[in-house]
Amino acid sequence: MKPYLLDEIAQALNTCCQGGSAAAAPATFCGVSSDTRSLEPGNLFVALKGERFDGHRYLAQAVQLGAAAFVVSEPSAWEQLLPEQRRPCFVVPDTEVALDQIAGWYRGQLTAKVIGVTGSVGKTSTRDMVTAALGRQLKTCGTKANLNNHIGLAWTILSTAEDTQALVVEMGIDAPGTMARLSDMARPDLALITGIGFSHIAQFKTRDNIMLAKGQITHGMKNGRDLLLNADDSYLRRLALQKQEQFSVSYISTAAQPPASCRHRLMQARNIQADLNGVSFDAVYWQDGQAKLWQKNVTLPVAGLHHVQNALFALLTAKRLELDPRQSALGLMDFQVTGDRQRLIRVGGLMIINDSYNASPESVQAAINLLGEVGGPRRRVVAMASMNELGEYAWALHQEIGERLALGDVDELYLCGPFAEAVEQGARQVKPGAMHIHRFKDRDSLIIALLTALNEQDILLVKGSRSYQMEKVVEAVVSDRTEG
């Protein structure tokens, strides 16, 4: 970030700057920090406060490291500094809200096209696909890891260089009302919604409420900006009816016959081919009801048919930005899976699908599909923990997952978590005696049994909500088979 006047922060926060002397403190700042471990000279230090930390305790250390000014909610912390340590200070009611305001101000300094990505499933992969598709033609950056809440979004914006041409931000919510806050900060030029599922339904109560909450990604957008939706999702087709007069709506579809109502602007995948090494398809663009080949033989470097949807969003984004089709398609080859999301691991003859990062009904179904796509003749083994935040739907949704596991021809099922019985019940309803199902009191008991049961030519899928840390199952299996 280049230097900016402190007066600009005063305007952004609607408050005045107090304290400090002209000799001790510059009238500008360069960059923003809330962590003295990464603070650089000239930074504006925002004293965030949480249950386990309080930035107000580190003001003196921030001075030593060269902080140019402070944003605080406890003026007494600033007053307790020695006079020569008192850098200019902005006193606000809530430093988290102030961080949003500062990020929103800096968003206004950027000329980059901002692409916001949300949805119940596939946000991170879609975000990374969009980044890859744009990256060979535009200077592109975006959300790192899973920093998709309001603090993560703020830091993503604030860490963006002024010469960035495309900024791709993931926007995740787990409670009503939070998406509008994210959208007001990011003010997307293009907004993508991947789908409406059951994630966080305990908080939202119904999928209609989830649809409305995700739809608030447009809250901070200007009229006429682009809204990209999944035409294969009936909830999003309904949402489009609410948004189409205010925004420019486009669609993606993997269906053989996309909905007729969505064919005015739609990116479709045809001739889809998949194997262990990746996926390929032809991208067809519909304009006013007419379909034309947009790019032939688009190739993805990862297995899984569900990635076609993510790639279509990336290509449609490139289309709306008027980028070259071939370079956009080639850019998708730069895509890499983030974290423990459907990562294929080979240990000797054993194949592992490490999808342990998190779990929702939609992502579990995608993982089951992938198991079927790449499993071949191998014995199919699944180690699965429960899915969280499903509220009153939890038992029925776990039961449904059990049914889908049985339909996916899983041979051996290892379960833990409070809804393991529901998964087993669903599986047994479909295939009463065909599956070997084992339930355990916890993950560690599951690991002990699994290690002795795996065969050399098995394929193992590991899945579960974040709190169960199912990546430890993968670590244990890999360690057990690589010792010595």
Image (spheres, helix red, strand yellow):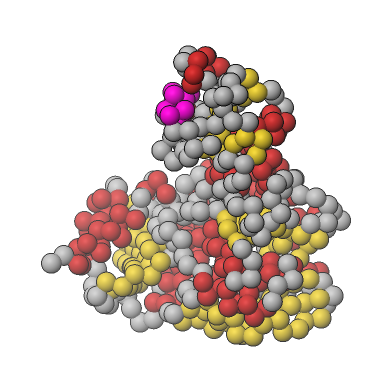
Q: Residue sitting at 61 percent across and 46 percent down? A: 2
Q: Main secondary structure of the magenta part?
A: helix
Give the image location of residue 300, x and y in percent.
53, 76
Give the image location of residue 227, x and y in percent.
74, 59
Figure quadrant of residue 192 = bottom right
- Above or below residue 67? Residue 305 is below
**Foreground residue among 164 and 193:** 164
**Foreground residue among 230 and 259:** 230
Q: Is residue 252 left or right of residue 124?
A: right
Q: Residue furthest left?
A: 484
User: Count the marks: how many?
Assistant: 0
Give the image location of residue 421, x and y in percent.
38, 52
- Above or below residue 181? Residue 354 is below
Can see residue 285?
A: yes
Give the image location of residue 247, x and y in percent.
81, 56
Q: Residue furthest front?
A: 23
Residue 46, magenta (yes or no): no
Q: Residue sitting at 78 percent across and 71 percent down? A: 265
- Above or below residue 332? Residue 51 is above
Q: Which residues are magenta?
A: 56-64
Q: Residue sitting at 48 percent across and 40 percent down? A: 40
Q: Quadrant of the C terminus?
A: bottom left
**Foreground residue among 411 and 84:** 84
Q: Residue sitting at 58 percent across and 21 percent down? A: 20
**Foreground residue among 121 and 197:** 121
Can see residue 205?
A: no
Residue 59, magenta (yes or no): yes
Figure quadrant of residue 230 = bottom right
